[in-house]
Image: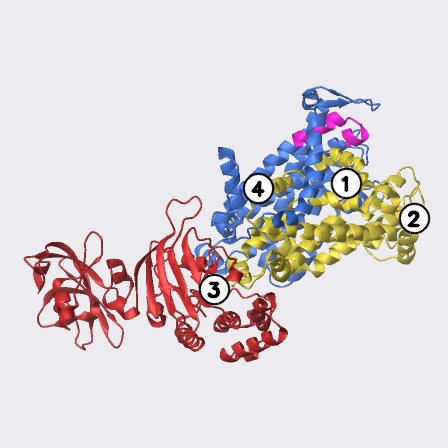
Chain colours: A yellow, B blue, C red
Amino acid sequence: MMQRIKPFDHLILIIGALFLIAPVVMAFMSSTHSAIDIHSNGLYFTPGSDAVGTYGKVLTHRGGFTGDVTGMRMLMNSMIMGLGFAVGKIVLSMMAAYALVYFRFRFATLLFWMIFTTLLLPLEVRIMPSYQVMSTLGLLNSYTGLIVPLLASATGTFFFRQFFRSIPDEMLEAARIDGAGPYKFFIDILVPLSRTMMAAIFIIMFIYGWNQYLWPLLMTTDESFYTLMRGIKSILQVWIGSQIPDYNEAFALAVLAMIPPVAVVVIFQRMFIKGLTESDK
Amino acid sequence: MTDSPLRTTLPNGALLSRLRAWYSADTPNPAKRVQFDRPLTPWLFLLPQLAVVVIFFYWPSVQAVTSSFYIEDPFGFGSTFVGTENYTDALTSSQYASTAMFTAFFCVMVTGLSLGIGLLLAVKADKVIRGAATYKTLLISVYAIAPPVAGLIGMMFFDMHIGPLTDLAAFFGHDLRVGINYWDTAFALITISVWKQIPYNFIFFLSGLQSVPVSVREAALIDAQSGWRRFCDVTLPLLAPTAFFLLVINITYAMFDTFPIIDVVVKDKPANNPITLVYKVYLDGFKGNDIGGSSAQSVILMVVVAALTVLQFRFLERRVHYG
Amino acid sequence: MAHLSLRNVGKTYAGGNQPAVCGINIEIADGEFIVLVGPSGCGKSTLLRMVAGLETTTDGEIRIGERVVNTLDPAERDIAMVFQNYALYPHMTVRDNMAYGLKNRGASKATITERVNEASRMLELGPYLDRKPRALSGGQRQRVAMGRAIVRQPAAFLFDEPLSNLDAKLRVSMRMEIRKLQKRLGTTSLYVTHDQLEAMTLADRLVVLNQGKIEQIGAPLEIYRKPASTFVASFIGAPAMSLLDAFIENGAITLEGHVLAQIGNMAGPVTLGLRAEDLRIAKEGLPMMVEHVEELGAQRIVHGTIGAQTLAVIDTGEAAVQGAVRVAIDPDRLHLFDTTTGQRIESKRQTARELAL
């Protein structure tokens, strides 16, 4: 296709990219300066010399009220949250979608609607009663409590259902003639066929789990379960009343919190876009 | 093993047939011709998801509806049935009205701006050839940043001591006081929320644009001289399904997913600060201990969200025709 | 290897009031190649899938060998199927694709290797055994699908339009290969296609289906020469048999006022069937206005009208054909059909001739 390239197009793209990226770059650069420097000179666009000290402190310093939660610990919790959520989501939703697409049984339609109604209401609108249920079940301050309730939304199931339906009918028919029952077909054929889809959904769900804020905020009072997102909330609470806030540490924490998901998106860009645009959420 | 995918045991009705229409139209792929006929196996596969859904979705949702009709004793001595009082209280309170007004304003601003900028960038990124991959990577990487992190970074930029944006405003003679001045805070919230959402819209618009067949683009090049006309007459209509889908997603985003940004920026000090309805649910429930009132507000929001999602489903149904 | 019999087989879908297939009676001998042919929606695929066990059978009885298989699972019916889109498992190598069915049946490693090697030798798939289907051409995929069926050594092969996804040239060569292979293996086969040419060339016997019912069963030439109905007449053979409205008066068949032949003592309107190759352009005969000529190289098809009715004639001459011509008809090669039922009418004249032979 022939089209002239106009400098104007590039100008707009550069402005857009700057608007999006500059804050991230400045957050990172500023995190390598001392709090006093930031306090007196504002944010930085160039690297400073305090990186090792600041990041070392954020990762290993025992902070919080109980004095035993470190950045490492929060990083680990965030990782558990991201991985646990992604894996749980894929396992649960693949199984459910398999039942809904490949079986004929009573109440299938009813169950379909029971599961897909969960798409109607985000967690935020039922946050209060959800909290009460969790406390009734004794799941506050536990990884189960952090991860499992978030699996209640049917986004993954919806996605896998769409995908399974796009698989040619003949795949099951051939497998049945080849003597594969429901379990064999699932393990031997369907799971390997879904590998790319699983990877794509894994990326989306990992980011979603890693980035959770409100739920960990309510679920965890025990600091050993704090995720990085929860840590951001507490570092800001400490600020109130302090003379020179630890800007550098806050930035360092923010950088730690965004590196894994951003890296995943950049590295697996194609798969990520595919997963996102084809799963519609 | 019959062909009919829906041997429903439910009675027929207008609503049900509508639901069924969505059920079968939400995908261009029809149900399987051949399915397994086992009465128990599917339940085994469904069990984990069903358990999670019932315990963590239906139970709390039902509880939200029930407790919205009660007033909980502040000292924990049980609760009193008050009928719809919580609802009338919420809907008639001036505070609720102003929060609702702000939420609407906030939604319009965030949705409009992030859709507009996302579209503009996608159109430009679709045009350029040199550096296209780099622009793309730069523009989408922010997607993965969590809202609270966005809030934190944004806060720094609007900080009264170190914030470059505060300095910029001062240069233009405005004393930007985020966290203190109502509209200044609103401005900061909108800016941060838009910043965070642009990559999402960009990704969808770009993939929408790139799925326009080359032949259609070439036909447009022949038929329309000016680029603007081409955009309005060809590109925009083809993007309409994507845009509509994004509209719903963006409204949902502005209403719910911005919660962390608001929480980080407003920091539990809603005194004279703008907040959205979801944030008010959280404040009244957890900080104000007004469980009944908070639940009533939840239910109102549920209705709004349900309506939005129904809209989205309708769209999905229609998108099949667009291919 | 076994014979196959369908007795009074029918299927009505849940919620449907019309049966998709009904009253099917076919006895298939061991090693016979039967082709089910008909237009799309005639129920031929449904019937095949009923034999495979992929669709339930609501009426009648299907036997494979001595077993009634109506309620058996596809895997228990001892059949193998070749699908139109091949349905190869994309994540498995060619070898694994062929071996999967045997593995599920608990065949020993040695048996599996032996059978896969034998099939791949037969189909010349040796060099591709460790490739994924993605890396194969359409024809090669089709062979793998065949191989998957062969290794199982089933009682019957079921083919569901296996050549439709191939280009024309490949289709012809694969057609011959399938037939050779089937002869060599001697496996009873049931083959579905909508392509009448494919059906004619492959079948020991043809089953022509229309709207879920059998129109005619017979050897290809038998059906070609004596189509049982106007439907079969127009479906089998290319160009399609011309069907014209004629009239029998005083024992003579008249078409648009021209007497064609003397016939027994019938009377009234009749549908006259004329095959293009039974007609020729001549000095004498029916007057026809030429409308359009299709050159095929060795011959040409001349389309024209007699009165208001259209007719196709095969001509092998060299001279240009246009305007008004005359068409000669061999009176022995007329086909007569009942105007209302479409059923073939055996005229007295023809019967007399046949008796004399």
**What amino acid type is highlighted by mark number 4?**
Phe
Say yes or no: labels 2 and 3 on the same chain: no
Q: Nearer the viewer, mark 4 or mark 1?
A: 4
- Position of residue C306 in the picture relative to residue B108 (left or right): left
The amino acid beneath tag 2 is: Ile
Estimate the spatial distance between the alpha carbons at disc 4 and disc 1, rounded to whole Å. 35 Å
The magenta region covers B283-301
Q: Can residue B249 be seen in this view?
A: yes
Identify the image quadrant of residue C68.
bottom left
Disc 3 is placed on an element classified as loop
Find numbered disc 1 in the image and state the secondary structure of the residue it sits on: helix
Residue assigned mark 2: A36
For marks 3 and 1, give the one nearer the viewer.
Answer: 3
Q: Distance between the residues labelled 2 and 4?
A: 65 Å
**Mark nearer the viewer, 2 or 3:** 3
Share a chain, discs 4 and 3?
Answer: no
Q: Which mark is residue C83?
A: 3
Circle 1 sits on which residue? Answer: A214
Same-chain status of marks 2 and 4: yes
CA gap between label 2 and label 1 equals 31 Å
In the image, residue B288 lies in the stretch drawn in magenta? yes
Identify the mark nearer the N-term, 2 or 1: 2
Q: In this view of the protein, which residue sits in the foreground, A164 or C32?
A: C32
Mark 2 packing: few (<14 Cα in 10 Å), some, or many (20+)?
some
Residue under label 4: A107
